Amino acid sequence: MMNRILAVLLLSAFLAGCPRMAADSVAPAVTSTVVFCGTLIDGLSAAPARNQTVTIEDGRISSVTGGAPGIDDFLDLSGHTCLPGLIDTHTHMVESAGDTADLSIFYTRSLDVEQEIAAELAATTLNAGFTTVRNLGAYNGWAGRTLKNRINDGEIPGPRMQVSGFYLTIPGGGGDLVIPDFPEEDIPARVRMGVSRGPEEFRRKAQQAVDGGADVLKAIASGAVLAYGGVPGGPEMTPEEIEAVADVAHAAGIKLTAHAHGAQSIKDAILAGADSIEHASLADDEAIALAALHDVAFSMDVYNGSHIASVGREENWPEEFLRKNDETTEAQRQVFTKAHRAGVPIIFGTDAGVYPHGDNAKMFRIMVERGMTPIEAIQAATSVAAKYIGWADDVGAVQVGRYGDLIAVTGDPLADISILENVDVVIKGGQRFK
Ligand SMILES: [Zn+2]
């Protein structure tokens, strides 16, 4: 969007100075980008293509053709492998890794400081090759929306964002930021906006989220790892409560994703109409079969547990969080393998915010170790992710009509997936950011 506005401004300034110049003779030079890729993994095809020229006009891809460009002015990536801009379907862009050590920071940190931090995290995420993220909540309910607007207005660099707003969760549930021994009257209301009980209240709060501009709703169906009290697998929201939220989401034409570790809550969420499940750590065979049957995607943060185990102890995170993490990490990786084999759509979601922003691509290695082929892992973070977040027309593939979001790496990520941890070039909407 910024490109287009900039182009229009430049064009009008130019035309104002040279009134006799024909408009069509200057417009393409301002808005088009031509990229020549030695190898192109387009996000859809099973095999890469060699020597491809990608043309981006007005932010969107206008052609992808074999052979070198017939013009002099192009970005030469003949020594690189190009891929679509990556998608992370589970991030927390206004929360830094490390905030978990003392969650009371969300009561006391000013909103301005929070936005300064968020701007840095957005730039870091974009530079790591993630041109699209789905922000699945912030303790400060609408901080993600503020960040999204700043990026879309061109004020700061960052990925395209879908935001969920506040967590829909039960009192004392996995998304309710109450801390033992912290006086409840000192907790700011903004961190508890989605706390509800009963289908009617959930329906009302879900509608508030939609009216506030949520692009997706996030329900905390069962207990969280990084929350006080509760059991990671233990159901919190009832099937009727999840269904109330799903109805509101679908009436608004958006998706519902459910945070659920336990088998029962995963099944409840699928049957209640959730479109995807976050974590899915303790799914049993029945839950996996149900997800496959209903075409419900699992977004599984399979690297996160290693990160938490290593830094959590160093940073003195609460012992309760570390114990719950140990209980879910290996179990979740085994479920990942089974779910993938059973045909459950897997979408790339790291839970960045717990996991350091910018390290997102480290998860690819675990996905491949646990049974995906490299091309499947890449598609989980491109075309498959785009489909399940409802943005298949816009992102997730280097294909005519979609946004001109692409990245480039040195070497062959199909031979060594960890190459994606070092992205050399990032282009979003035809504009180069790295
Ligand atoms: Zn999360």
Image (tube, rainbow, N blue to C red):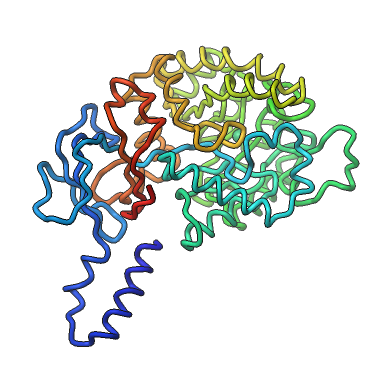
Q: Residue at x 58, y 33 (%)?
A: 272
Which image quadrant for residue 240?
A: top right
- Who is closer to the viewer here, 148 or 110? 110
Q: Count of labels shown? A: 0
Q: Looking at the image, which residue is at 42% across and 21% down?
A: 365
Q: Residue at x 54, y 37 (%)?
A: 357
Residue drawn at point x = 35 percent, y = 65 percent:
4
Q: Position of residue 340 (x, y in %)?
A: 42, 18
Relative to 99, is 434 above or below? below
Q: Decide if residue 12 is on the left or right side of residue 228.
A: left
195 over 154 or under it: above or below? above
- Quadrant where the N terminus lies? bottom left
Residue 171 location (% of width, % of height)? 79, 37
Q: 311 and 108: which one is in front?
A: 311
Position in image of residue 128 (x %, y %): 44, 39
- Split into quadrants, the picture shows ligand 1 in the one at top right
* Depicted 415 relative to depicted 40: above or below: above
Q: Residue furthest bottom?
A: 19
Q: Quadrant of residue 233?
A: top right
